Image (spheres, helix red, strand yellow):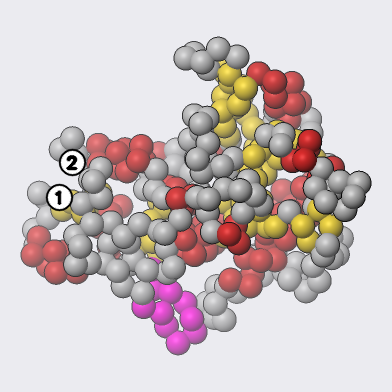
Amino acid sequence: MVKAVFVQGTSSDYDDQPGRYYHFPKRYLRRVQESLGDWVVFFTPVKDSGVDVSERGTYRGTARLVAITPDPQKTDHYYVSLERPTVQDFAVGVPRIMNGDFLEPALAGKDGGTNTGVALQAVRHISDATFDKIIAYATQFEATELPRFEEATEDFAPGFADEATHFLFDHDRQTIASLTNKRVRDRRFRLAVLRAYDKKCAITGWDFTNGGGRAEVEAAHIIPIEYDGRDVVNNGLALSGTVHWMFDRGLVSIADNDEILISSKVNDKDSIERILNPSGRLLRPPRQAHQPHNSFLEWHRRHHGFAA
C-alpha cells in the first residue's frame, strides 16, 4: 500500500460525492489499486474558482480507501469508496508550498518552478513522511483557529503548533491516532463548518460569541454519523443550539429551493417563524466548495417526512 493525493475541484466533470466516493478514469486505476486500504489527502486545484484564493492549491482533507467498483454508466471509469469513520475535512487548507518548499517533492521543477507534468496528474503517490507533514500542518493551523477558552484541550495534538518544521513522531501511532480520535475529529468538523459559515447560523443568521471568543453556533450534520453521514463541510450546517436541536429532530428542514421548512408536527410554528432570518431561506456559505450537498438535504427531508 502507498498513500496518495487525489485532486478534486469544485467544478469537476467527475461524479464525486463528498466524503463517500471518488470518481476517476482508467489511466489511474493501477495507482488507486496500489493505495487501496491506505490514506489519501484531497487537493484543491490551483485554478479552482469555486474556492477562495487562499484555498487554491491546498490540501483540504483526508480519508482511507476501501473498495473500487467499475462505473456502470461510463466505460473505463471507476469509483473508489472512502471509509466512513476516516473521512474528514481540514478546518484550514494546507498550502502545497511551506517554508519555500513543495510538500510533495515531485512537484518541484528543475527551474525552481512547478513540475507541470506531475501537477496535472489527478492521482499522485506520496510517502508516509509527506503525508505526516500535511497532517501535522493541518493540525497546527486548526490549533490557531481555536478560541482562547473552552476548546483548547490536550486532545488536540499538543506540540504541533510550537515548531512547524519538526515532525518528530511515529507515523503509525501518532498521525493515525490523530485522524481516528473521535474528540479530535468532532472538533475538526466543528472548526471546518463554522469557518465555512463565518460562525453564523444558517437558519437564523445569528452570530453570537462569548467573552472568550467561542461562537454560539454548533456544527450540525445533515446526515447524522449513525446514518452513514460524513465529517465533511458539505454534510454540515452551522446552526444555533436550539435550531440544531430542532433540525436533528426533523422539526425544521431545507427545501430544494433553500426555503426553510417547518414540520406540521411543531406545536408553536409562530415562535419558530420569528427566529428565522428575514429571507426565510438557508443562508449558504459564500464559497462553492462549502455548499451543503443537495442529496444530503434531500435525505434529511425524506428521513423526517417532509413532502417531496
Q: Nearer the viewer, residue 257 or 218?
A: 257
| Relative to 90, 126 lies left or right | right
- 214 is within the stretch colored magenta: yes
* 146 in relation to 5, above or below: below
Query: Could you tell me the amino acid type at mark 1?
Result: Ser
Label 1 element class: loop
Q: Quadrant of the N terminus?
A: top right
Tag 1 residue: 263
Q: Is residue 3 visible?
A: no
Q: Where are the magenta residues, as a range?
A: 208-217
Q: Quadrant of residue 8?
A: top right
Residue at (60% x, 61% y) in the render: 54
Q: Is residue 1 left or right of residue 207?
A: right
Mark 1 vs mark 2, CA separation in Å = 7 Å
Instruction: Tell me the SS state at disc 2.
Output: loop
Q: Residue at x 70, y 20 (%)?
A: 27
Q: Hey, which quadrant is residue 144 in on the image? A: bottom right
Instruction: Looking at the image, tell me whether mark 1 or mark 2 is earlier in sequence order.
Output: 1
| Residue beneath disc 2 | 306
